[in-house]
Amino acid sequence: MSNLLKLFILFLLVPLHLSAQDLTQLGGDLTTTITGHNGLQVAAPNVDDEIRRIKQLEGFQDFHRIHTKKSGLGVKVEGKKGRRFAHKGCAGCHVQNGKGRVRLTRGQKRKDGMVVKVSLRGLQDSGAPINVPGIGEQLQRHNTNRNIKKKHRLRLRWTSAGLKGTYPDGTKYRLRRPLLTFRIKGYARSEIISSLRMTPGLNGLGLLEAIPEHVILSWSDPEDSNNDGISGVPQYTPDRVNGGLGLGRFGFKASNPTLAQQTGAASFFDMGVTNPLFTVEGEEIETSEENFEKLVIYQALAGVPIARNQDNLKVIRGKELFQTLGCDDCHKMTVTTEDSENPELDGQTIHPFTDLLMHDMGDGLADERAEFSASGREWKTTPLWGIGFFETVSHVKQNYLHDGRARTIEEAILWHGGEAEAAQDAFKNLSKADRKALIKFLKSL
Ligand code: HEC
Ligand code: HEC
């Protein structure tokens, strides 16, 4: 066989081999075929145990309830200082477990899911950001004590200045970035660093927790020894459940190592509710161990919506491009889980499209706020499963990236810089039809 012929056969085979993998069962045995409004909430089909099914259901109820004195779910504190919060319930931001709306309004209405994290310059010894005295972790609009007025003025606008571009094929695009203004009494603006965050959709969280640490570390290449321009480093943060440091998995900077800790932090910082993991000295714990466990189980054992249209030729083409462009160098397509505590989560072959590592995404996406070992330029690879499904559940306009600046999936890709610059460049050089196919593939997830 001539070399040329060999090359030709290789050329034919490689893409076929790449695209051959069937991704339909995104969450392994946790995959559900429930396609409507409740698609991210019901227990996965493999939760056989009656007691765990009931806990999952009760956790579902708590996630959707409002935390007030009356509901019995906490917020009993109205004391002198009160406690700040953004919403009274998880579902106020994570609408039906999907994304929140990218909007900052005066009253912060239901579905408005933006958070502005603020801190002073520098880091604590633990690596945690330094809270602004009297403000806390983030700018909050509400207080359990209604007499306490907020101490900041907050405004969000968007600009497209300097953000217009043209694809090599002549198609034009225009991006936007946020312009956030606020003032905190007693501080010069230059003393405060801030980071705007949108509310992400919640999907397959128990499975993400069950990805073996050694596998995640095997994907990490801090010195970029294979010279592909992609390093990827793990984030280690104080682990309130197991003690010591834990591999961060949750949040845009993977600041929380366990789903329980993420849930505790959300209850405390977003809702002002104490819980077994986040307490206030001398005050009663508002969420009981039992209710807290249910809230975690609810999220861990919720089903993962099935991928759609996997036989569509454009979707197949898009899947192939996702791999040839190197998107899967970070958005890892397939991994097998290990979990000794939750039989449902153990040994599942899943397609989360993340490596859970931190990547330098370039100046464009950077802000100044470091969290633990992650700098302002580094972000966790966002899992892409559910990306085409979140809209179905929440009925809010879908936005992308940590601050919701991207109005389309295409814009999200165009913002990729730093370690992802080459992949972004390769995307720009595709034909229009191929760019569409790639996006169609992502929407099928
Ligand atoms: C004020 C809006 C708001 C409320 C209320 C809220 N969250 Fe979140 N949630 C967010 C934002 C914003 C993030 C991203 C945080 C970050 O890393 O910056 C997030 C992240 C998360 C994550 C991590 C997801 C991932 O893929 O890494 C989980 C899990 C989560 N929230 C669960 C909860 C639970 C449970 C509750 C209720 C106890 C809750 N949230 C309440 C806004 C909210
Ligand atoms: C170097 C690692 C890396 C590579 C390569 C990469 N990504 Fe990403 N991707 C990320 C990180 C990190 C984020 C989160 C950035 C943020 O939120 O600011 C992200 C976010 C996204 C999002 C937004 C998801 C959401 O819901 O907000 C999409 C879509 C996406 N990537 C698609 C792609 C595609 C398509 C490719 C290939 C052309 C690609 N990525 C290549 C690391 C990477």
Image (spheres, grey):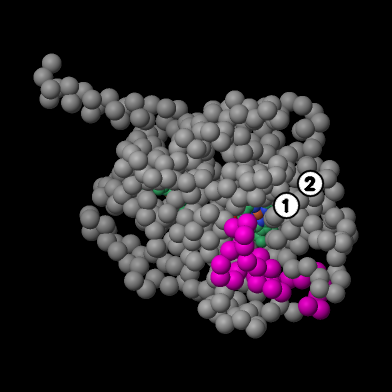
Residue at x 70%, y 55% (from the top left corner): 265
Residue under pointer 1: 264
Q: Locate residue 328, reporting x and y percent.
A: 40, 39
Q: Quadrant of the N terminus?
A: top left
Residue 90 visible in the snapshot: no
Q: Which sits earlier in the primary sequence, circle 2 or circle 1?
A: 1
Residue at x 29%, y 52% (from the top left corner): 425
Residue under pointer 2: 292
Proximity of marks 2 and 1: CB atoms separated by less than 8 Å? yes
Q: Residue 24 versus residue 1: which sits nearer the camera?
A: 1
Predominant SS along the magenta part: loop
Q: Secondary structure at mark 2?
A: helix
- Residues shaded magenta: 119-148
Q: Residue 312 versus residue 275: which sits nearer the camera?
A: 275
Instruction: Give amino acid for label 1.
Output: Gly
Q: Quadrant of ligand 1?
A: bottom right
Residue at x 36%, y 65% (from the top left corner): 174
Q: Secondary structure at mark 1?
A: helix
